[in-house]
Image (tube, rainbow, N blue to C red):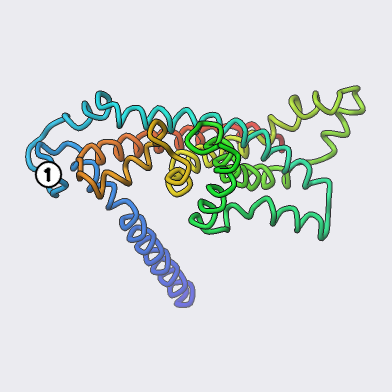
Amino acid sequence: MSNYNLSSFVMRRASNAALYGVASLVAFTLIAPLLVIIPMSFSGVQSFAFPPKGFSTQWYVNLFTNEAWYRGMFQSFGIGLVVTLFSLVLGTMAAQGLTKVKGFLNAATSSLLLSPMIIPAVVSGVGTYAVFLKWHLTGNYLGFILAHTALATPFVLTTVSASLKAFSKTLEYAAASCGATPTETFFLVTMPIISPGLASGALFAFMASFDEVVIASFLGGPDLKTLPVKMFNSVYVDSDPTLAAVSTVIIAITSIAIFMVMRFNRGRSSYAPA
């Protein structure tokens, strides 16, 4: 091996090692708070001390027996599922529509539809509250669903649009030439191919709704207080270690959901036509 090749090999290995080192440091910085929260959820005393003192599962028991906690959890899950369904329909329709327009109209429409992702949450919360208060949509499920759907739909639009860019229109033309209606073409041809984008969009939409706290604080009422709002209030009111148990459950559910979506998308990519 020549000196040039040896030097190039050493530099490449050194750059790879540096890259892996920086990536590992960033990953550890992001994961470290999770590694602290999980042990704290098994604390034997009512405090957030780390390392935890003692071992107990009482905070998990409290999560599923204390009405204020489990009611907020079920409300958040229910709202999140409905929002995910609506967002998938609206986001997919919008993505399909944007593929049929070009130029300025496409850019303007995309910017308008993606604006909920850009506008500060506090501004959206104040504006939503002012409008929904006149429409009597505060403190009820319909208001939450409408507001969260507006926030979650751009995530579906983004992922589905990315999938449609790799979608060949000739497949739709071929289906039409075989006598398929536009509806049949979408469900039998288009949707199976863009399903990875739909799965990713559904995950992002659900988490956008489930994790939303600012608008939920404005629209909530005595009988409708989502889990993120309850968690936010718990930090300042009573420092209940149940908050750590809730966080651990959310981490576990989110990790499982991400793993399932990744496996689904990888499986679809493996069977995708060349």
List the single residue furthest toward the front.
134
Q: Residue at x 50, y 54 (%)?
A: 121
Q: Give residue 104's position: percent from left, percent from top.
A: 81, 60
Q: Give residue 20's position: percent from left, percent from top.
A: 38, 60
Q: Give residue 26's position: percent from left, percent from top.
A: 36, 60
Q: Quadrant of residue 173?
A: top right
Secondary structure at badge 1 equals loop
The residue that disc 1 covers is: 52
Which one is nearer the viewer's eye here, 55 or 111? 111
Which one is nearer the viewer's eye here, 22 or 224? 224
Q: Give residue 220's position: percent from left, percent from top.
A: 44, 39
Which one is nearer the viewer's eye here, 40 or 210? 210
Q: Residue at x 68, y 50 (%)?
A: 113
Q: Residue at x 55, y 43 (%)?
A: 133
Instruction: Identify the image quadrant of the C terminus.
Output: top right
Classify residue 193 as left or right of residue 143.
right
Q: Quadrant of residue 234?
A: top left
| Number of numbered callouts drawn | 1
Which one is nearer the viewer's eye here, 181 or 123? 123
- From this view, report whether residue 112 is shown above or below residue 247: below
Q: Residue at x 30, y 31 (%)?
A: 68
Classify residue 134 as left or right of residue 61.
right
List the single residue furthest toward the left.
54
Classify residue 167 as left or right of residue 158.
right
- From this view, report whether residue 8 is shown above or below residue 75: below
Q: Amino acid at mark 1?
A: Pro
Circle 1 Cα neighbour tier, 10 Å, few/some/many (<14 / 14–19 / ≥20): some
Q: Quadrant of residue 248?
A: top left
